[in-house]
Image (cartoon, rainbow, N blue to C red):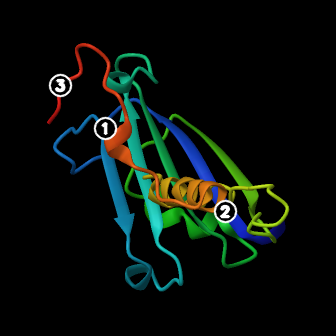
Amino acid sequence: VRIKGKVVRCICILDHPIPNTKDALSTQIIIPQKQVGRKSDIYVSLVSSTHQVAAKGFFIAMVSTTVESENPEAEIKPGLDLLGPIAQKFVSVSDYYEPTDKGLESQIFISESYDATTHFETTCLDVLDIFKRATGEDFDFSKIKHEIGDEEQ
């Protein structure tokens, strides 16, 4: 693997939903890069007791972006400013890795690190790409068997 970049993440504990979201118990906000003069978007996500991840009356907010400067915490400020009062926050900066080999010859298939996105789209696409490289075919979702009680929609 090689380092592709760095990601700054802040996990915040709140005692309220994000202001101006109609008290939504789940929120996903993407602040477009151009809106804040950056090369990368800023991602804001909120989950609550509805998701069984916080006690009733508490909320977990996550703010993240790709690091572009020597002051990563300042880079997520536009996202943090949306949250209102923060009871506790935990900031971390992590290296973002990517594989140097597709695994076709070595048969070693390595995923990329989690990027700054909070909606997992890039992670899901990476898993599907690994499946295709390992098996030579696209994953067929229609072959997934549903458990009794699952309803097709």
Q: Residue furthest front?
A: 136
Front tag of 2 and 3: 3
Q: Distance of mark 2 from mark 1, alpha carbons? A: 25 Å
Left or right side of 127 for 95:
right
Q: How many marks?
A: 3
Task: Tell me what residue is drawn at x 22 percent, y 14 percent.
Answer: 149
Mark 2 or mark 3: name the one nearer the start of the chain. Answer: 2
Label 1, label 3: how far apart the Cα atoms are? 31 Å
Label whose residue precedes the other's in the sequence (2 or 1): 2
Residue 26, numbered circle? none
Q: Secondary structure at mark 2?
A: strand
* Disc 3 residue type (three-letter): Glu
Q: Quadrant of residue 35?
A: bottom left
Q: Which residue is mark 2?
A: 7
12, 139: nearer the viewer: 139
Q: Secondary structure at mark 1?
A: loop
Q: Amino acid at mark 2?
A: Val
Which residue is tagged 1? 17
